[in-house]
Image (cartoon, rainbow, N blue to C red):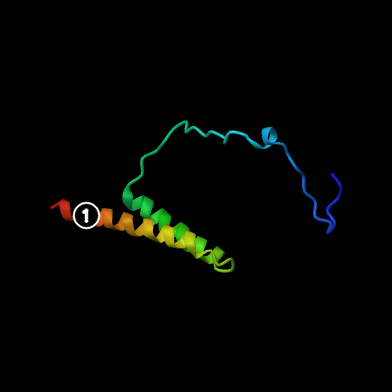
C-alpha cells in the first residue's frame, strides 16, 4: 500500500485475516470468597481506580463498580437481618 498522505501508517487486512476467535480462558481451580471479603476487596480496588482514573475522566466504570459494591452491601445487610 502507498503511504498515507499525512504520514499515518495503516495496514489493510482481508476478512479472513481479521476474523479470529477470542482467546478462551479456563480456570484450573477456584477459591470461594465471602461477600464481606469481596466487598472489602472491591472497595479497595474502587478507591485505587478512582485515584488513578481522575485524570482520564472515565467515571462510567467507577459508577458501575460503586453500584456493585452497593449491591454487595445490600446482600450482606439482608443476611444479617435473616440471621437472628
| Percent of width and height locating residue 35 | 32, 50
Name which residue lies at 68% across and 36% down: 15
Q: In the structure shown, which secondary structural element does the residue marked by tag 1 occupy?
A: helix
Left or right of 68 on screen, residue 13: right
14 and 75: which is toward the camera: 14
The crowding category of the residue bearing disc 1, from other C-alpha atoms within 10 Å (few below 14, some 14 to 19, many at least 20), is: few
Quadrant of the rendering where the N terminus is positioned: top right
On the image, the x and y values in percent for residue 21 come to 58, 33
State left or right for residue 29 relative to residue 51: left
Residue depicted at x 53% and y 33%: 24
Q: How many marks?
A: 1
Question: At x 32% / y 47%, what residue is drawn?
Answer: 34
Residue under the image location 67 percent in, 37 percent down: 18
Place of residue 45 in the rendered image (x, y in percent of width and height, measured from the top left): 47, 57
Quarter holding residue 66: bottom left
**Is 71 placed left or right of 42 in the picture?**
left
Residue found at the far left of this picture: 84
In front here: 17 or 36? 17
What residue is disc 1 on?
Answer: 78
- Quarter of the rendering containing residue 33: top left
The percent coordinates of residue 58 (x first, y second) are 53, 63
Q: Is residue 37 left or right of residue 81?
A: right
Amino acid at each position: 500500500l502507498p503511504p498515507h498522505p499525512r504520514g499515518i501508517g495503516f495496514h489493510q487486512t482481508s476478512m479472513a485475516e481479521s476474523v479470529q476467535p477470542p482467546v478462551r480462558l479456563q480456570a484450573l481451580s477456584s477459591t470461594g470468597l465471602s461477600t464481606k471479603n469481596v466487598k472489602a476487596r472491591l472497595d479497595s480496588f474502587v478507591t485505587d481506580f478512582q485515584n488513578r482514573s481522575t485524570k482520564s475522566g472515565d467515571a462510567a466504570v467507577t459508577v458501575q463498580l460503586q453500584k456493585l459494591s452497593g449491591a454487595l452491601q445490600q446482600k450482606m445487610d439482608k443476611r444479617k437481618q435473616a440471621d437472628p
